[in-house]
Amino acid sequence: MTADYKKLSDEELVFRYAHRNEPAAVNCLFDRYGHLVFGVCAKYLRNTEAAKDATQQVFIKLLEDLRRFEIQHFKSWLYQVSKNHCLMQLRKPIPVVNNEIASTENVESYSELHHKIEEERLYDKLDAAIAELNTEQKTCVDMFYLQKMTYAEISAKTGYSIMQVKSAIQNGRRNLKIKMEAIREVKS
């Protein structure tokens, strides 16, 4: 039965858990994306144990959220949920015991945290800029840069010629650069 779940899309797994109450569907999602969530948590929290705990907390929260929300793109949604969970952890007040900070292990300076938040805003703006690209550019840019696929793999998966793929990536990259420069100018 587990092998059958591995063949299903993320959205079908979400549907099976949310509407049919099939726990094996969530187990399959965990097997598929547990490493992604752990990686995001490790990046932000910079502590292996804290990242493990956060990964568990994200998937526990997922059990409720999958039933509450209509999720179109599970992987990107899960990434955003993981990122937000970590940012909330970083914003929590630092425990003080006997007028001393209880643990300085995860403490970052205000400027480092501010820098991370600014960086995340830029990533969010980049995501929005990617969403504004035409379908061909968006697909090819996503597959090439985010999914690390080769031109040949993109061509095989989309049916576009190699030249169409190269052109879409080049034009998409140029359009993204223009959009991001416009954002920087507005910010300045």
Image: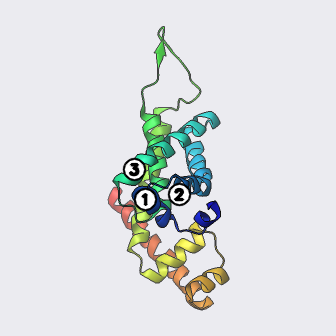
Q: 68 left or right of 144? A: left
Looking at the image, which residue is at 52% across and 83% down?
Answer: 168
- Amino acid carrying mark 2 in the image: Ala
Tell me whether circle 3 and circle 2 mark residues in contact (CB < 8 Å). no
Question: How many residues crowd mark 2 within 10 Å: few (<14), some (14–19), many (20+)?
Answer: many
Residue 41 point in image, percent of width and height:
55, 44
Instruction: Tell us which disc is closer to us: 1 or 3.
Output: 1
Q: Which residue is mark 2?
A: 25
Q: Earlier in the sequence, mark 3 or mark 2?
A: 2
The vertical placement of 178 against 62, above or below, is below
* On screen, residue 4 above or below 86: below
Q: CA distance from mark 2 to mark 1?
A: 10 Å
Taking the spot 40% from the left edge, 68% from the top edge, the residue there is 129
Nearer to me, 169 or 83: 83
Q: Residue at x 57, y 73 (%)?
A: 143
Q: Mark 2: which secondary structure?
A: helix
Give the alpha-carbon distance from disc 3 to disc 2, as whole Å.
14 Å
Dividing the image into 4 quarters, which one contains the N terminus?
Answer: bottom right
Q: Amino acid at mark 3?
A: Asp
* Residue 20 disc label: 1
Instruction: Say which of marks 2 and 1 sits in front.
Output: 1
Report the number of numbered marks: 3
Q: Amino acid at mark 1?
A: Arg
* Mark-to-mark CA distance, 1 and 3: 15 Å
* Residue under label 3: 65
